[in-house]
Image (cartoon, helix red, strand yellow):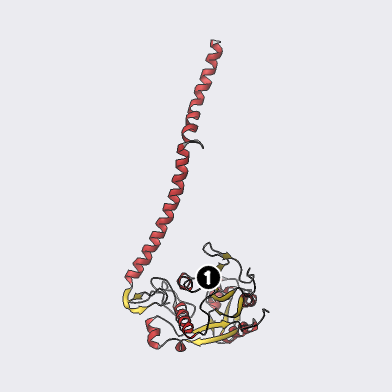
Amino acid sequence: MQGTHGDKMPSQANQLPALAWRTVFGPDSIAFGTSVWWDSGMKILRKLIRRVRKLNRRMFRALRYMGWRYYCPLCRGRFRKFSGWDGGKDFRGNPNLKLCPWCISNPWHRLFWVALERMWETGKICDSGRLLHVAPERSLGARLNERFTVTTMDISGSKVAVRTDLTKLPFADGTFSALVCCHVLEHIPQDRIAMEEMFRVLRPGGWAYVPVPYQEGPTDEDLSVTDPLERLARFRQEDHVRLYGFCDYLARLSEAGFEPSVMPRAEIVTDEETEKMGLTDQVLFLIKRPPETTAT
């Protein structure tokens, strides 16, 4: 018996380290629960640090450009000058795209917002209801949410309400009173289908803001071009599939059923306001779905 008992003792002794480890660090142990909470806490802390760093960069940029000469109608900030686009060029070929140091709005965002406010004052377009914001910009989104019930969408991204293709919108006919889609159609091979979908989801009498890069003359379009350098040379950006001709773009919108209208910058703001808000000599593309029509 003693021999048998003695034979078992070494085996149990060898198991003691494993038993101790499971007791202290096993799935049912306090240490294991603590480690899980620790990992979750560290993830939250790292995320918070990233947000603080991002906020600090914005605050530093705003302080760097602080002044009274220029004004952004979107964030209502005042600055001594607008910031550039890291030495690059915008879609119109300007060497310095005038971005707001705080909300990062660009000239066509600011012109659009000023035009909206002035059209709302005169009752030319609706200023409430549901609005679809495609590929949403932070600067515009913050202000649009003050007036509308906004649904954001994009083909990708985690910060939008709906991830979908603009050519296959999962909304019923006439869902939205307004739609904002800035510099998106030049990326879409089937842009005519996207225009028809936008027309379909707008209610009769609804409006949409759909600016695109354009040129005088015909549209330069070739879907077989996939080389980024050739696209950059022809379409002004590596992921564009066309460069619209001004008149052709309006014609495509009309074919989809819209009533397109073009508002030159001079009809919206004065030269003094243009300088103060960092605007460029551009036009505003605002389209409407005619009242009492059916989708095509």
Q: Quadrant of residue 48?
A: bottom left
Residue at (40, 62) in percent of width and height? 54
Classify 10 Å Cα crowding around label 1: few (below 14), some (14-19), many (20 and above).
many
Question: Horizontally, is 296 left or right of 124 in the view?
Answer: right
On screen, 31 above or below 180? above
x then y, percent, for residue 239: 55, 71
x then y, percent, for residue 192: 64, 78
Q: Secondary structure at mark 1?
A: strand
x then y, percent, for residue 265: 46, 86
Looking at the image, which residue sits at the far left?
Answer: 67
Residue at (36, 63) in percent of width and height? 56
x then y, percent, for residue 4: 56, 13
* Camera-nearest residue between 138 and 222: 138
Residue at (39, 70) in percent of width and height? 102
Q: Quadrant of the N terminus?
A: top right
Q: Quadrant of residue 157?
A: bottom right
Looking at the image, which residue sits at the far right?
Answer: 296
The residue pinned by badge 1 equals: 150
* Camera-nearest residue between 40 and 217: 40
Instruction: Say what amino acid the circle numbered 1 marks.
Output: Val
Q: Quadrant of the C terminus?
A: bottom right
Question: Horizontally, is 50 left or right of 173 in the view?
Answer: left
Number of marks in the image?
A: 1
